[in-house]
Image (cartoon, rainbow, N blue to C red):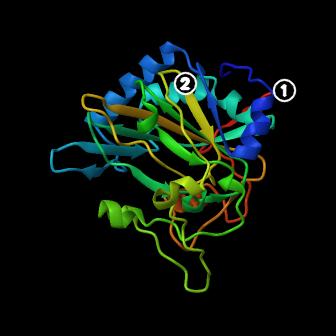
Amino acid sequence: MPEFHKLAPALAKTFSEDGVVFIPNAIEQFWIDRLDSGIQKNVNTPTERGRIWNRDDQGRTCFYDSQAWREIAEYQDFIENSPLASLAAQLLETNRVNFFFDAVFVRTPGAQFRTPFHQDEPYWSVKGLDTCSFWMPLVPVEKKSALEFVRGSHRWAQEFRQMNFGDLTSDARDQRRELSRKEYEPFPDIEGHRNDYDILSWEMSPGDCVAFNGRIIHGGSGNLSPGCDLKVFNTQWLGDDIRVCFRGEGMDPDHSSVMREHDLNHGDRIGTELYPEFCFD
């Protein structure tokens, strides 16, 4: 049974309205150390999904890997036994959540690469509003280097033309198509018009985390000071309205094949041992 960390009830309301909340001291040092050990293993031996997202002319990199929790014992221990499942359930105001997938981002000291503003849920093999992701750094993070969020954008009605990360990484696995039969709104130029938006971010310490909805517009987490690195462990959790969604635009991560192997079809409620369920009375 995972640990239970009681949240102030007001946080669920803020999460619903703003799409993001900052939770200080959410995770004990034991888990930070455990994940740090796991990330070292992950960087040394990436999974087949690992990749370098960016390498600048000074050799500074941004490493990414995902869905490694079945291969790295420290990750699996954290997902199954840390308080995160209970935090997700409280923020989504439900008594059950399913774990979706993990992702790690490791930027070397001084890296300047910033993730472009985007939404997550339009890339996923599921669809729905009841999602909760945790951005959790394992090292101190300055506010200027933290992930940024456009308050309330998870409830905007537009269906935006999303970033094609394949153009950014030159990796075929990141390619995203556009469907000719669909009308997409141009993605807003957040970076070029920052004063037009309510952008949130926080200075963070190990043990702090930011919980956010998969549809909120977010980006950044680069612009590191000299000598400062950034190691982040992300987890994604799914709530009541989530259904399997095989997207013609392409999916990242694309779970469609393994979902079908486990008899999960488009429109089904999420489940099976692929996405373990955590229940709280």
Q: Nearer the viewer, residue 197 or 161?
A: 197
Residue at image location 26% in from the left, 36% down from the top: 110
Which amino acid, mark 2? Asp
Outermost residue to the right = 281
Where is the N terminus found, in terms of image quarters?
top right
Up-down relation of residue 252 to residue 187 (above or below): above
Residue drawn at point x = 25 percent, y = 28 percent: 227
Q: Is residue 179 above or below residue 205?
A: below
**Disc 1, SS:** loop
Of the numbered discs 1 and 2, the one sitting upstream in the chain is 2
**Residue 95's spot in the image, x, y percent?**
81, 34
| Badge count | 2
Q: Residues within 10 Å of mark 1 (few under 14, many from 20)?
A: few
In the image, taking residue 264 as reference, residue 17 lies left or right, namely right
Which x, y percent locates residue 201?
54, 38
Q: What SS does tag 2 mark?
A: loop
Q: Quadrant of residue 23?
A: top right
Vertical position of residue 244 compared to residue 52: above or below: below
CA gap between label 1 and label 2 equals 25 Å
The C terminus - image quarter: top right
In the picture of the structure, the residue carrying the numbered disc 2 is 208
Disc 1 and disc 2 in contact, CB within 8 angstroms: no
Residue 96 visible in image: no
- Image coordinates of residue 170 in percent, x first then y, are 29, 64
